[in-house]
């Protein structure tokens, strides 16, 4: 009886980690473990099934991943039957995936083309800077040669 404590209302309360669990989390865990079929109604769609989705989000938020995966799987199974009943219906997951992947792929292509254009302009600017540096160096060399010739002529004149 070292881990239990009796309160004034004569209820036994556990000490330690057990008391930190929320009552909602415990009830949710019991419901998920007892039956996965009760987590999502097979006669309703996603619109009326927000309680199951909220339970999945709560399980994911509290890092109870086993129960989160059970809830997600039961949601998919329950709503899959509604979508594949008629031949004209399409599953929304591939459409959602395509709607997400298409802009990402387009952005990657645009970024790649922009990178090529920027690299080309950078190369042109670097070559222009190199040519300008060579021209400046040649100009200084020519001026230096002229100054040397003038000084030599002046010295010859004076001597």
Image: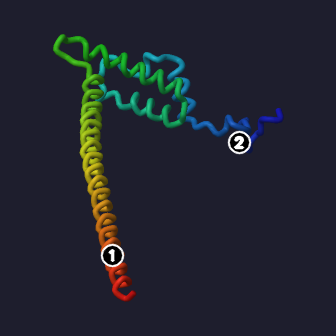
Q: x and y percent of residue 52 in the render? A: 40, 28
Q: Nearer the viewer, residue 53 or 11?
A: 53
Read off the residue under disc 1. Answer: 149
Q: Quadrant of residue 153?
A: bottom left
Determine the residue located farthest toward the left in the rendered image: 88
Q: Quadrant of residue 135?
A: bottom left
Q: How many marks?
A: 2
Query: Does 73 appear above or below 137?
Result: above
Query: Does 25 appear above or below 7?
Result: above
Residue at position x 36%, y 81% in the image: 151
Q: Is residue 55 left or right of residue 118?
A: right
Q: CA–CA distance between discs 1 and 2? A: 113 Å
Q: x and y percent of residue 95 in the render? A: 25, 25
- Placement of the C terminus among the 4 image quadrants: bottom left
Q: Is residue 38 left or right of residue 20?
A: left
Whichever of labels 1 and 2 marks the residue nearer the N terminus, that label is: 2
Alpha-carbon neighbours of circle 2 within 10 Å: few (<14), some, or many (≥20)? few
Query: Does 65 appear above or below 110?
Result: above
Read off the residue under disc 2. Answer: 9
Residue at position x 46%, y 17% in the image: 36
């Amino acid at each position: 009886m070292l881990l239990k404590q009796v309160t004034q209302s004569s209820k036994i309360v556990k000490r330690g980690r057990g008391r930190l669990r929320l009552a909602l989390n415990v009830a949710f865990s019991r419901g998920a473990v007892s039956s996965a079929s009760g987590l999502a109604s097979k006669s309703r769609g996603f619109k009326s099934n927000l309680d199951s989705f909220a339970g999945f989000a709560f399980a994911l938020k509290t890092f109870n991943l086993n129960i989160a995966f059970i809830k997600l799987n039961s949601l998919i199974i329950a709503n899959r039957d509604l979508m594949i009943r008629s031949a004209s219906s399409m599953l929304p997951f591939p459409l959602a995936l395509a709607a997400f992947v298409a802009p990402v792929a387009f952005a990657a292509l645009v970024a790649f083309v922009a990178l090529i254009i920027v690299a080309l302009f950078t190369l042109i600017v670097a070559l222009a800077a190199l040519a300008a540096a060579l021209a400046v160096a040649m100009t200084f060399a020519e001026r230096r040669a002229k100054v040397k010739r003038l000084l030599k002529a002046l010295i010859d004149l004076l001597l």
